[in-house]
Amino acid sequence: MLVLLGFATPATAAGDSDSTVAGDDRMALAAGPCGSSYRHIGHYAVGTSPVIGYMDVYWSSTAKRNCMVTNHAGPTYGVRLYTQATIKPHGSAYAWPPCPSVGCDDGRYSYYAGPVYTPAGVDMSNKCIDIKGAIDWTQASRTRIHCG
């Protein structure tokens, strides 16, 4: 398993999988969970005492979009639990996206939910995002972050 920055790297486009990653796919994974043009810009805890996961946020200046993954950590790592990752542009004009969709992934996962993305066609340059993550019964959210 390839590990970047202490969190699991996805093997599939949405949610985790028990399948192994073959040859050419390993290079794609090395780019990170969201794609080669995305760079890691935020790391937010899910839970306290203990922290059971992290919401990791990414930005692509090429695509002008944000991406997010909710990763299991500590006592939940490798344990199949309800896991959710949700992202949206900040503001009342944007409702939380339903699951499943490009902005929301949820299910019973052992390692992560996501990656999920802000809407295509919405230039997120200099715009804030809102994120929500959940693992089992523990939820976390951040609003009006990464605004520029």
Image (cartoon, rainbow, N blue to C red):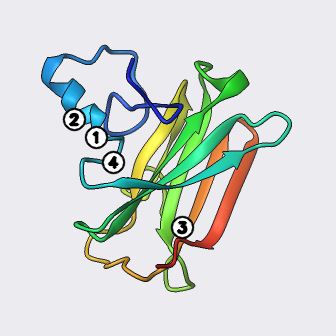
Report if the CB atoms under discs 4 and 1 are less than 8 Å apart: no
Spatial CA span between label 1 and label 2: 6 Å
- Residue drawn at 65 percent across, 37 percent down: 53
- Residue of label 4: 34
Vertical position of residue 140 compared to residue 144: above or below? above
In this rendering, which labeled residue sits more in front, label 2 or label 3?
A: 2
Please name the residue shown 41% across and 52% down the image: 116
Tell me the distance, in whole angstroms, between the alpha carbons under discs 4 and 1: 8 Å
Q: Earlier in the sequence, mark 2 or mark 4?
A: 2
Q: How far across and down, in percent of the image, does residue 140 sit?
A: 70, 53
Name the front one of labels 4 and 1. Answer: 1
Point out which mark residue 28 bears.
2
Residue 27: x percent and y percent? 20, 30
Query: Mark on residue 96?
Result: 3
Instruction: Check disc 1 and report the residue beneath it.
Output: 31
Q: Which mark is residue 11?
A: none
- Residue occupying image coordinates x 70% and y 45%: 46
Q: Amino acid at mark 3?
A: Trp
Residue at 77% in and 43% down: 47
For the image shown, how many numbered marks are present on the structure?
A: 4
Give the class, few, some or many, for how many residues have Cα within 10 Å of label 4's Cα (few <14, many ≥20): many
